[in-house]
Image (cartoon, rainbow, N blue to C red):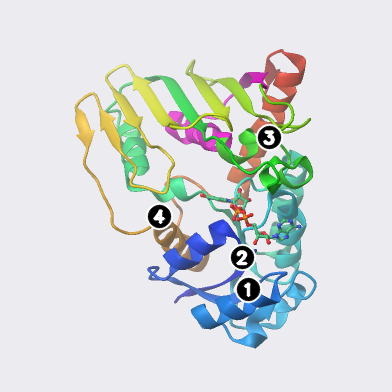
Amino acid sequence: PVLRVALMGLGGYASRVAESMQQSRRAKITGLISGTPEKLKSWGEKYGVPENSRYNYESFDAVKNNPDIDAVYVITPNALHHDQVIRCAAAGKHVICEKPMGLNAKEGREMVAACKKAGKQLLVGYRMHFEPLTLEIHRMRMAGELGAVKFFQGLSGFRIGDPTQWRLNKALAGGGALMDIGIYALNGCRYMVGEEPVWVTAQETKTDRVKFKEGVDETITFQLGFPGGVTASCLSSYNMNNLDRFFLNGEKGFAELQPASSYGPIKGRTNKGPLELTTDRPQQAVQMDEMAAIILDGRKPVIPVDGEEGLRDLVIIDAIYKAVKTGGKVKLV
Ligand code: NAD
């Protein structure tokens, strides 16, 4: 069977998802949710979504009565995810939610609980979890090919443009670079190291207080400690380009991805040489095929993408912001 998906929020990333889904084998667009009538019309015509499966932000609870929609993919600004996900679950639909899943751990817990109560699955749009080179390094580490892991470095950032965009608005973004791009380094260190961190320290640098207002972080460096003694050192920034690199060091070898989390192609190498694994399929097509298998067939992905996984990142993000404020070491339990 095919996963029939309604897209919510028809912006930049939704456009990429929609285009990529044309190459998906197991997921198709059967619904649209937007506040802009012209977008509903043009997207509806382009992707063959009939008028009775087009909704706005007031009317979308009615997806409940639409038998052609199995899941809603929420691709709106971060601050809207919490309420929208809960409404979709209450309407009896599975939910795929973009990262960050919510604004903080409290929101995340409520989202997980609401989906559980409704008996619906909650997945987070972590596309790297299905990316071939990422999975190959994960496999190498699991197979012991790198030996005991000692250190991870994750660098995630880009120089952000337009100062009026929602990403630089605390109320809509919930924070700054960490919520948006630093989350790749954070999430990456967890699946690359293969343990959950037990402490975090963090430092913030702000060079432009006009562009990056109170509560919107420009650059944060953060460090995580893992139970086995591994440490991770990460950089999250809205003020640097060419910043997209993962480096995992073990006793027997290293693995590196650069770029590590772009839309592709991802490039990798180890101490033995380049990692030669390429795919001509867009990441989002692979992601949607895998998510269809998770939702419809109960497949367990190698690297989880469920609500609990999204929540763990939010717990650590809360701890990073706390560490920035206090200057101290924040323990994670
Ligand atoms: P965007 O600004 O391009 O699109 C956001 C859409 O939400 C717009 O169509 C806008 O009209 C709509 N919207 C609905 N209510 C709104 C409101 N109250 N205020 C502002 N806009 C509103 O943003 P985007 O880049 O598509 O990001 C959307 C989400 O997707 C974010 O959570 C982001 O983190 C995530 N994202 C994920 C990836 C990824 O690779 N997984 C990449 C980009 C974005």
Q: Quadrant of residue 236?
A: top right
Whether ligand 1 has any atom under 8 Å from the Cβ at mark 4 is answered as yes
Query: Which residue lies under the disc numbered 2?
Result: 10
Tell me the number on the disc at residue 203. none
Q: CA distance from mark 1 to mark 3?
A: 35 Å
- Mark 1 vs ligand 1: CB below 8 Å: yes
Foreground residue, 98 or 94?
Answer: 98
Tell me which numbered mark, 4 or 1, is placed earlier along the sequence: 1
Q: Which segment is the magenta one?
A: 182-206
Q: Residue at x 74, y 30 (%)?
A: 210
SS of the residue at dot 2? loop
* Callout in the foreground (4, 1): 1
Q: In 3D space, how far apart are the residues under numbered discs 1 and 2 (Cα atoms)?
A: 7 Å
Q: Quadrant of residue 55?
A: bottom right
**Crowd band around label 1 with a 10 angstrom C-alpha radius: few (<14), some (14–19), many (20+):** some
Ligand 1 closer than 8 Å to the CB at disc 2? yes
Viewer-nearest of discs 2 and 3: 2
The x and y percentages for residue 180 are 61, 41
Q: Is residue 236 left or right of residue 332?
A: left
Quick one: SS at disc 1? Answer: helix
The residue under label 2 is which amino acid type? Leu
Q: CA distance from mark 3 to mark 4?
A: 27 Å
Q: Which residue is mark 3?
A: 315
Residue designated by label 1: 39
Q: Earlier in the sequence, mark 2 or mark 4?
A: 2
Of tags 1 and 2, the one toward the viewer is 1
- Magenta-span inclusion, residue 324: no
Please tell me which of labels 2 and 3 falls first in the chain.
2
Residue at 49% x, 15% y is 229
Q: Which residue bears the numbered disc 4?
A: 283
Label 3 environment density (alpha carbons within 10 Å; few <14, some 14–19, many ≥20): some
Amino acid type at image mark 4 = Gln
